Amino acid sequence: MSGSDDPDSYGRRALALAGLALCVGCAFSPPLAPASDVGAAMDAAMDAGRDVSLDAALDAAMDVSRDAATDSAVDRPEACQGDACSVACAPGYGNCDGMVANGCETNLGADNRHCGACGNACPGGQACVDGACRLTCSAGQRVCSGQCVSVQTDNRHCGACGLVCGAGTVCSSAACTSTCAGGTTACSGVCRDLANDPGHCGACGRACSFPNGVAGCRMGVCALSACAAGFADCDGAAANGCETSTGTDATNCGACGNRCQFANASASCSGGRCAMGACNAGFRDCNTNALDGCEVNTASGDVANCGGCGVTCPPPPIGTSAVCAGSRCGTSSVSCPSDRRDCNATSGDGCETVILTDVNNCGACGARCSATGGAPSCAGGVCSIACSGGLGNCDGVVANGCETSTSTSAANCGGCNRVCSIPNATASCVAGVCGVARCNEGFGDCDGMPANGCERNLLSDSAHCGACGTACLAGRVCSGAVCQVSCGSLSVCGGTCRDTSIDPDNCGACGTVCSANGMATRTCGAATCNGVCSAGRANCNANLQSDGCETDINTTATACGGCALPCSANHVAPVCSGGACTGACEAGFADCDASKRSNGCETAVTSDVANCGGCGVVCPTRANASVSCAAGACGYACTGSFRNCDGMDANGCEADLRVSGNCGACGVTCPTGQSCVAMAASFVCQ
């Protein structure tokens, strides 16, 4: 009969399907193989000359690989014991491999290795039928006295067990006769069916034999009828019999073609059951479930199981992510936010420095705020300094600190840009107060007042001729610092002899006074006003007579540091301080090249990816993305078919929406048998 007609098969399956899952997470229900498939296999076995009992043995062997998830895995109800799943097998089935995951995988009624009970293997030449090991005889044979005999031709069992033919007769067609019936041949006094007798197949005495198998005879040709328990004819070549030990062969374990394989682990076969061996280097079986093998890579990538199951890497420092490599926890390369930097180049502490407030790393690593002459500070990544008493930052450059002594500098006396300008004298600064260091040749400070300098010309002043207080007598004039009766070649100006070629108060003519404005030295030469400008002053209009050194090049933005040296007004209100261009940048702009004279605040820190939010703040590149800067904050946009599916900025747009796993959108995995293809400007599984 065919497999579809087998009532026992239907009964066993119905009983197996009666199991109910009693523990959440324990249910396991792979599809059952159709009953017609089992029947087809049985019919094929019968066509090959095997009887029903042999078909049952073959079906049991086939169940190991093909029906492990059908006739066995479903055939049990499940329950929980403590925190683990357990299984109670339906009658006729057993959990012989001890694994709950595949349920009651063994049919105890037909499995030669587990006949009636787990571990009860049938000996060679016997098969498991209805849970009992039975002798398997070829077609036309019967079991007599524990042996397979042909009652058609056996003289000791002719027609029935124990019926012995008398002397001079032979058993032919189940009857004792004087000659062999048609279709049989006398072989040593016994009628033999040479077409079907495996002991005399095709000729008397020609016995059929196959290694590890049960021999049969068909139309006078030897044929393999069945395999011994634990063996199978996997190469389909009858000549070498049942060449494969399905009990130990890892490529044909329990059945032909059932290869033992476990992810990242060695595999072996014992008793016709696959067993997982040692995990490959760097892998562990953390969930103690052999179905997925050694599922965890503890050597690389898994920060929750780094170097061992359950070994979780500690939280990483700011600007890094945890990584597992070489079975050891570590951190990724540093990718700092805009307000932090990895200034000590040590990944272990990540982005340890806040560059917005750190005076040793202000705005950038190593950018130390100067402490020369004062107390430094850092705010918003920009250095500033509070000067100590008697010192000043007169050049406006924070980098060199409070470089000027306002107690002694004649150009910054008592404060920055407070220039000591003393007429006809060299100025001095003492304790922040301007004074006369020395008078120019021919002049004297006769009133002792620094404000008007060396106010007397000792060469021509009759009241102070040659020295303060030395007055010429009536009728005499002072000429060349000597009281004389007449002026000779000199000019008499206001009753005083004056040399108009060199007298700055009568230069070229009496009463033509050379301006002392901004002059360190006021002189007259060849009847023309000349001299030397005081520090920080310049004669930009080329007129020393009317206004002297009229331009303060320390404070004038149009002539900062010198005539015709204007400060740029590009996005800045220009200010000149100490001869250097300064001034506050407009909102959203910065002087990143430190040249406010040439181009002012040239950098738009709200949109420049190389200076985003501040000078030198470079927006990091991201994989498969375009980088941008908006409102002073770095951003990026994924390009093409890439997306940031893991939500981590550090590795950019790591996912390709063209492949399964993220097909068309993050997390979309194509079902088995489908692939990710382009469809209407997108990607879909099909």
Image (tube, rainbow, N blue to C red):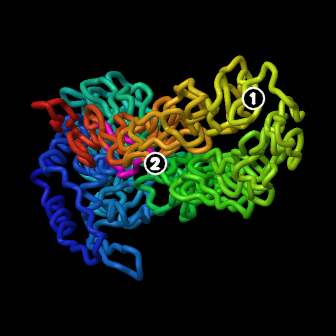
Q: Is residue 143 above or below residue 75?
A: above
Q: Which residues are magenta?
A: 644-656
Q: Main secondary structure of the magenta part?
A: loop
| 652 in magenta | yes
**Viewport quadrant of the C terminus:** top left
Q: Is residue 217 above or below residue 267?
A: above
Badge number at residue 498: 1
The amino acid type of the residue labelled 2 equals: Ala
Question: Which residue sits at x=83%, y=27%?
Answer: 486
Question: Which residue sits at x=38%, y=34%?
Answer: 234
| 461 in magenta | no
- Residue 19 placement, left or right of 534: left
The amino acid type of the residue labelled 1 equals: Arg
Badge number at residue 584: 2
Question: Which residue sits at x=67%, y=47%?
Answer: 419
> Can you tell which quarter of the image residue 625 is in?
top left
What element does badge 2 sit on?
Answer: loop
Q: Earlier in the sequence, mark 1 or mark 2?
A: 1
> 10 Å neighbourhood of mark 1: few (<14), some, or many (≥20)?
many
> Residue 391, can we see it?
yes
| Residue 651 on image: x %, y % | 43, 43
| Residue 379 on image: x %, y % | 54, 59
Badge number at residue 194: none
Which residue is nearer to you in this view: 136 or 16? 16
Which residue is nearer to you in this view: 302 or 380? 380
